[in-house]
Image: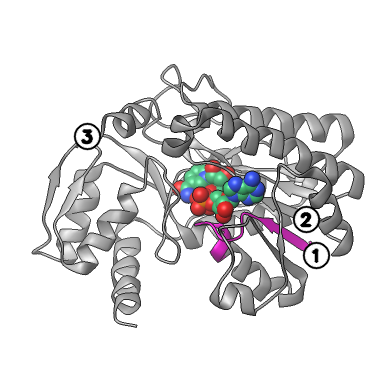
């Protein structure tokens, strides 16, 4: 990776990934791609190049890749699970028609491509615990349908055209820089904001609903590490299970209470979010990622809670 394009650079992952890539590969070598209405601000805008980059416009995408001599693309454009369920056709247009444009440009200009998948690529027929790398993938959500298609189309471009596609199945990501974009696991971010503000949290997900989660620094390391991995070691490509922790609302509440004893939580279950969460697995087996590119997370629930609460306290008093 020498010249990198991040598509969706102002989102929850993109805003932090772009800065991390700039710190590793040089500020001028990482282009922040954004859409009108989601413009970069602050250090994201100040530290490097930025271009309007809508995945549904294949020609504009090709022009950016040519202009900046791009050799690696992180394609983060998507509608997340809850938003996608309300706008299924748009979710497909961005997630799949957009991906097709990205892969075609990558084929023509010899770029590596990483498009994240998700725990949403699994469904009710998938084993619930320790989901194997290769297993049943019959999701019920449109978000999940786009993620399975993303995996298949990315592998197709690798097998048929040799495009260097790689991907991870992200769990719910927890971070303090940019708010999440409307996913089922957003509650695990919102709960920390409530605790940091000293407010009571009303949880939209029922007690006992376990989902895989990960702290953003581990997620960013996974993306860089996988893109830098020796291709001869990769048996799988699209997409690797990766895991760091699995908890239910009570588990994260208790972790916060150990550090903020006055924190309180009640439940008001959101039917859509709960039905999506119920169709996802409890935990994933990430042995393949550990074996093929040395994946290893650093943060567990306790370490993440300590860091989140201290970073949010700094952010709120800045
Ligand atoms: N955040 C999570 O917990 C999580 C978990 C699993 C998988 N993922 C995946 O990671 C990727 C990034 O997720 P995120 O959390 O940063 O999402 P986000 O919603 O915060 O960001 C998505 C970005 O895509 C951009 N976008 C929307 N339409 C676009 C278009 N037509 N062309 C170009 N860009 C467009 C948005 O402006 C935004 O910057 C997605 O593929 C998502 O499915 C995220």
Q: Quadrant of residue 212?
A: top left
Element at badge 1? loop
Residue 147: tell me if it is visible: no
Residue 218: tell me if it is visible: yes
Location of mark 2 (residue): 72
Q: Nearer the viewer, residue 250 or 195?
A: 195
Q: Measuring from the top left, give residue 57's x and y in whole percent.
A: 76, 44
Asked if the residue at tag 1 contacts the one at tag 2, i.e. Cβ–Cβ closer than 8 Å, the answer is yes
- Mark 2 crowdedness (10 Å alpha carbons): few <14, some 14-19, many ≥20: many
Q: Is residue 27 above or below residue 158?
A: below
Q: Quadrant of residue 67?
A: bottom right
Asked if the residue at tag 2 contacts the one at tag 3, i.e. Cβ–Cβ closer than 8 Å, the answer is no
- Whether the magenta-drawn stretch holds residue 13 is answered as yes
Q: Measuring from the top left, give residue 120's x and y in whole percent.
A: 48, 33
Q: Is residue 248 above or below residue 282?
A: below
The quadrant in which the N terminus is found is: bottom right
Q: Which residues are magenta?
A: 1-16
Disc on res. 208 = 3
């Amino acid at each position: 990776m020498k010249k990198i394009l991040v598509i969706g650079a102002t989102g929850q992952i993109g805003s932090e990934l772009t800065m991390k890539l700039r710190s590793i590969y040089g500020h001028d070598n990482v282009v922040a791609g954004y859409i009108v209405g989601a413009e970069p601000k602050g250090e994201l805008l100040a530290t490097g190049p930025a271009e309007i980059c809508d995945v549904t416009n294949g020609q504009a995408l090709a022009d950016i890749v040519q202009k900046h001599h791009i050799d690696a693309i992180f394609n983060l454009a998507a509608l997340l699970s809850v938003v996608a369920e309300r706008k299924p056709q748009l979710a497909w247009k961005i997630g799949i028609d957009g991906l097709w444009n990205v892969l075609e440009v990558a084929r023509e200009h010899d770029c590596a491509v990483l498009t994240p998948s998700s725990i949403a690529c699994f469904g009710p027929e998938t084993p619930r615990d320790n989901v194997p790398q290769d297993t049943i993938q019959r999701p019920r959500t449109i978000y999940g349908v786009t993620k399975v298609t993303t995996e298949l189309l990315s592998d197709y471009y690798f097998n048929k055209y040799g495009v260097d596609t790689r991907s991870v199945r992200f769990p719910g990501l927890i971070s303090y820089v940019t708010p999440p974009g409307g996913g089922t696991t957003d509650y695990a971010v919102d709960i920390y904001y409530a605790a940091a503000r000293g407010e009571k949290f009303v949880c939209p997900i029922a007690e006992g609903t376990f989902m895989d989660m990960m702290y953003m620094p581990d997620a960013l390391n996974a993306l860089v590490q996988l893109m830098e991995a020796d291709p001869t070691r990769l048996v799988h490509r699209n997409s690797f299970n990766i895991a760091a922790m699995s908890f239910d609302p009570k588990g994260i509440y208790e972790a916060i209470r150990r550090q903020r004893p006055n924190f309180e939580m009640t439940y008001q279950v959101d039917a859509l979010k709960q039905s999506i969460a119920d169709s996802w697995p409890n935990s994933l087996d990430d042995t393949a990622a550990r074996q093929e590119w040395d994946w290893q997370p650093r943060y567990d629930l306790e370490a993440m809670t300590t860091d989140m609460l201290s970073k949010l306290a700094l952010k709120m008093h800045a």
